[in-house]
Image (cartoon, rainbow, N blue to C red):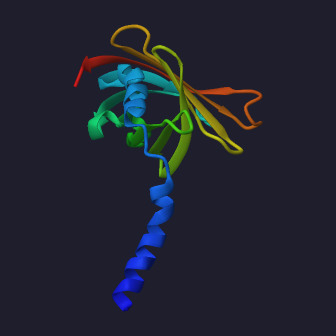
Amino acid sequence: MLIRLIVLLALFASAPVAAQAPRDIPAQVAAMNEIAFLKGRWLGRGLRKPPSGPDYSYAQTLVVEGKSSGLVMTIEGLSIRHDPTSGKPGTGSFAVVMYDEREKKYLFRSFGFGELIGATGELIRPGVFQWTTAGPMMLRFVVDGTQPNLWRETGERSSDGGKTWSPTHSLTAWRIDTR
């Protein structure tokens, strides 16, 4: 009797999962292929504009790879300030990007600066990818990869719900390996 009860409970517990429509894996892979221009190993330099304090230049490496049979992309970055007297180490970041075909949007999760940042992404046009965070302090990043082997990224912040934007950084990187 106890075994029948456990089996019955297991069946009821799994019913909502079984009732969901299956994921459209080919649609997810197709969407990820649209941002494949991001893949590779990149080396560049940029300029950060913090909300307070002086601007500073930095060197940047990026490793962008497809994972899980093309369903996920990882982005790993390392920034190093050009000013060796600052005593401040470089910052690392790690992001995961996937496409939610049900919601028709990219999901972007970034881990860096001691924060987990969730954002939604979209392909603005072929070769241009943007991700934006929600909340009281919004962040928006745009990567323009329309020129072969060149990554141009701009970052902005908004504290008024996206009505006005202030630059946070700019980065130009060159592909050094296609991975």
Q: Residue furthest bottom?
A: 1
Q: Quadrant of the C terminus?
A: top left
Is 172 rendered above or below residue 138?
above
Q: Residue at x 29, y 41 (%)?
A: 68
Q: Front-most of 24 and 56?
A: 24
Query: Does 44 sit left or right of 17 as displayed?
Result: left
Residue 128 position, x and y percent, is 49, 17
Count of number-bearing discs: 0
Is 25 rendered above or below residue 124?
below
Determine if residue 119 is in view.
yes
Q: Quadrant of the N terminus?
A: bottom left
Q: Front-most of 30 and 87?
A: 30
Image quarter for residue 28? top left
Residue 13 position, x and y percent, is 47, 70
Q: Residue at x 54, y 45 (%)?
A: 118
Determine if residue 82 is in view.
no
Residue 166 position, x and y percent, is 67, 27
Q: Front-most of 127 and 71?
A: 71
